[in-house]
């Protein structure tokens, strides 16, 4: 398996049923992003920094050498192919490595180098000669904890004697076990048990406390309170670092409970836009007619690559089965698949092995399949109350302005829903044109 690791292959839970909209939970989405991400996401925005002490000079580094890291750590970084700090790392690293240590809250979209930054901070602060836990990182799920651990192991591969242990369900050292690993990565509930019930970890020895994916964390029942309880018993001198991809009010409230006197770093996300997208609609009587319309386009859409979005798993299943029966090659990506299988499927699509991907909303967010030039909305995205889900529409077909390759979106629409097109046009101040067969000639 490409993304091997037995544990990841199990079926994952998700909120939805066949008939309901196939919406995934944020932890799965985040894991999928991690499994797929190989490169940094660049940003055209500049980093916003607010310092705890506004009078102190603001440092930013343009090279890893300037950080005066241990040699073996620097070697680890270069072995990973990193040449220079990412945008967020330029400011975050000097703060994270400062002496005396400073607390930090950092927000930037996934793929901008947050994990690499705090892993580097943990590795640079541990003392390999001391064989007890000194750094602790809380993650929302077991699988996300393992992904972070992999980065520690990779970046720290030349740091002799540094070990990682996972405080996650299913991993339970016996009472009284001496934990020698210097870095503990785990989920809040299990970490809490290890610290206080099993007394495997002496929190007083922790000098770096990281809370990763705060926005995902607060969505899991009990995680916030467990995290706060772990944090409360940390020594005053412990460095607190918190990361999040988004920064809504609830994340902010949580961050303030975890991190006292923080420096704050934010990097704006690239906005999605419909500017480069030609949008069309094709009116149909019913599902079967939409199906025929799609089959008629098949020849065209396979020249490029296409994603076809359906509202429910049931429709996605039905559609892909029919297309296959009619001899059209399509791949089906839905929330029924484990995250690992989804990642493999998206990878195949990226490599061009599959030309048409039929999917539900599990694929609408966060996945940048750059080469997709045609998006077909087999169903328009709607909210539970039946109104148009504008945000998902934008996520399905929008591109970031900067890299905005031209794209085409086709909305197959049943007569009774035609009014929704008008709403979309008004909402985005955009134009959705009637699809004519000659439009396809232009596409070619
Ligand atoms: P985030 O935690 O914000 O999602 P990551 O730290 O996982 O971001 O980084 C995203 C991707 O970019 C990973 O594949 C990581 O190995 C890589 N990466 C991180 N920092 C750098 C860097 N300075 N130079 C090159 N690649 C980097």
Image (cartoon, helix red, strand yellow):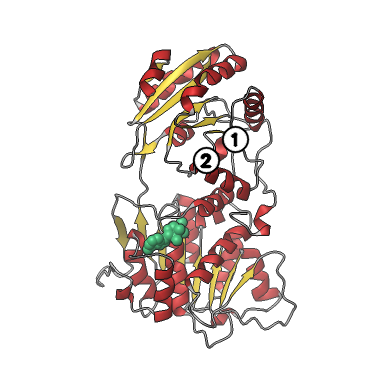
Q: Position of residue 236 (x, y in %)?
A: 48, 78
In the picture, measured across the screen, residue 122 lies left or right of residue 431, that is right
Label pair 2/1, CB-CB below 8 angstroms? yes
- What residue sits 67% from the left and 58% below the top? 7
Using the image, tell me which numbered label, if any, was put on residue 23.
none
Q: Which residue is mark 1?
A: 331
Instruction: Give the image quarter of residue 195.
Output: bottom right
- What residue is rendered at 57% in x and 48% in y? 343
Q: Nearer the viewer, residue 400 or 249?
A: 400
Which quadrant of the figure contains the N terminus?
A: bottom right
**Mark 2 beta carbon near ligand 1 (under 8 Å):** no
Q: Secondary structure at mark 1?
A: strand
Residue 239 shows in this picture: no
Question: In what quadrant of the picture does the C terminus appear?
Answer: top left
The disc, 2 or 1, on the residue closer to the chain's N-terminal end is 1
Determine which residue is flagged by label 2. Answer: 349
> Looking at the image, is 318 positioned above or below residue 170?
above
In the figure, residue 354 lies in which quadrant? top right
Percent x, y for residue 297?
A: 50, 20
Please tell me in which quarter of the rendered image ligand 1 is found. bottom left
């Amino acid at each position: 398996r490409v993304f091997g690791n037995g544990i990841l292959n199990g079926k994952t839970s998700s909120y939805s049923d066949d008939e309901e909209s196939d919406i995934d939970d944020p932890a799965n989405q985040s894991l999928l992003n991690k499994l797929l991400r190989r490169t940094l996401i660049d940003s055209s925005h500049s980093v916003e920094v607010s310092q705890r002490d506004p009078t102190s000079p603001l440092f930013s580094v343009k090279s890893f050498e300037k950080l005066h890291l241990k040699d073996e750590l620097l070697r680890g970084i270069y072995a990973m192919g990193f040449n220079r700090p990412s945008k967020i790392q330029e400011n975050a690293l000097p703060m994270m490595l400062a002496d005396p240590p400073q607390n930090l809250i950092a927000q930037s979209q996934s793929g901008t180098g947050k994990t690499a930054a705090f892993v580097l901070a943990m590795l640079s602060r541990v003392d390999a000669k001391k064989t007890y836990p000194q750094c602790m990182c809380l993650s929302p799920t077991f699988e996300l904890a393992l992904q972070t651990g992999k980065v520690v192991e990779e970046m720290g591969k030349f740091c002799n004697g540094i070990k990682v242990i996972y405080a996650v369900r299913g991993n339970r050292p016996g009472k009284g076990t001496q934990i020698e690993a210097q870095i503990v990565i785990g989920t809040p509930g299990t970490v809490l048990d290890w610290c206080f019930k099993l007394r495997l970890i002496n929190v007083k020895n922790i000098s770096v406390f990281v809370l990763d994916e705060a926005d995902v964390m607060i969505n899991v029942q009990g995680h916030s309170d467990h995290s706060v309880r772990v944090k409360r018993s940390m020594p005053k001198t412990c460095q607190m670092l918190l990361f999040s991809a988004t920064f809504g009010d609830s994340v902010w409230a949580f961050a303030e409970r975890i991190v006292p006197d923080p420096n704050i770093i934010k990097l704006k996300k690239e906005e999605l836009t419909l500017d480069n997208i030609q949008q069309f609609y094709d009116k149909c009587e019913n599902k079967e007619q939409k199906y025929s319309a799609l089959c008629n386009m098949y020849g065209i859409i396979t020249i490029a690559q296409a994603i076809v979005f359906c509202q429910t798993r049931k429709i996605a299943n039905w559609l892909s089965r029919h297309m296959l029966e009619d001899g059209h090659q399509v791949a089906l990506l839905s929330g029924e698949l484990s995250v690992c299988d989804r990642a493999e499927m998206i990878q195949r699509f990226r490599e061009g092995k599959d030309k048409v991907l039929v999917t539900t909303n599990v694929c609408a967010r966060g996945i940048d399949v750059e080469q997709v030039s045609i998006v077909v909305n087999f169903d328009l995205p709607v909210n539970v109350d039946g109104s148009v889900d504008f945000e998902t529409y934008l996520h399905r077909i929008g591109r970031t302005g900067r890299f905005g390759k031209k794209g085409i979106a086709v909305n197959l629409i049943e007569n009774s829903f035609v009014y929704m097109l008008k709403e979309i046009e008004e909402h985005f101040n955009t134009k959705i044109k009637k699809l004519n067969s000659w439009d396809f000639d232009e596409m070619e």
